[in-house]
Amino acid sequence: MIGKIIKTMRREKGLTQEELSKITFIGRSTLSDYEREKTDINFENIEKIAAACGYEVIFVNKQNKSNNLTTKNINRKEI
């Protein structure tokens, strides 16, 4: 699922994988692997990609009695 989100954000911004790679300092082949969900992505790289595409990552705790974060949302940043 995160791969589709990354690809959608990148395309909405009108960026190629190569362009996004240069902005984020993440290898183009690594970005491709993320989009195809061939490799796991760490939080730092999710934030880099989201920021480069004009998004921010927000974690929402849906369990009131626990500190477990169960849902991840990615929202459009106001620019």
Image (spheres, rainbow, N blue to C red):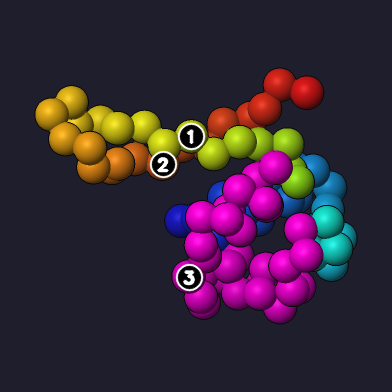
The magenta span reads 24-51
What kind of residue is marked 1?
Answer: Ile
Taking 42 as reference, is 57 above or below it? above
What kind of residue is marked 2?
Answer: Lys
Question: Spatial distance from mark 2 to mark 3, Cα to Cα?
Answer: 15 Å
Characterize the magenta stretch by its predominant secondary structure.
helix
Question: Spatial distance from mark 1 to mark 2, Cα to Cα?
Answer: 6 Å
Q: Quadrant of the C terminus?
A: top right
Residue 4 in view of the camera: no
Taking 32 as reference, is 73 above or below it? above
Which quarter of the picture shows residue 20? bottom right
- Which residue in the protein does label 2 denote? 72
- Which residue in the protein does label 1 denote? 58
Element at label 1: strand
Asked if labels 2 and 1 touch by Cβ distance under 8 angstroms, the answer is: yes
Q: Name which of mark 1 and mark 3 comes first in the sequence.
A: 3
Horizontal and vertical percent for residue 71?
A: 34, 40
Taking 2 as reference, is 54 above or below it? above
Question: Spatial distance from mark 1 to mark 3, Cα to Cα?
Answer: 19 Å
Element at label 2: strand
**Residue 30 is covered by the magenta coloring:** yes
Q: Name which of mark 2 and mark 3 comes first in the sequence.
A: 3
Which quarter of the picture shows residue 7? bottom right
What kind of residue is marked 3?
Answer: Asp
Question: Of the numbered discs in the image, which one, if any, rests on residue 40?
Answer: 3
Element at label 3: loop
**Towards the viewer: 59 or 13:** 59
Determine crowd level at label 2: few under 14, some 14-19, many 20+ residues with C-alpha closer than 10 A: few
Determine crowd level at label 3: few under 14, some 14-19, many 20+ residues with C-alpha closer than 10 A: few
**Towards the viewer: 71 or 66:** 66
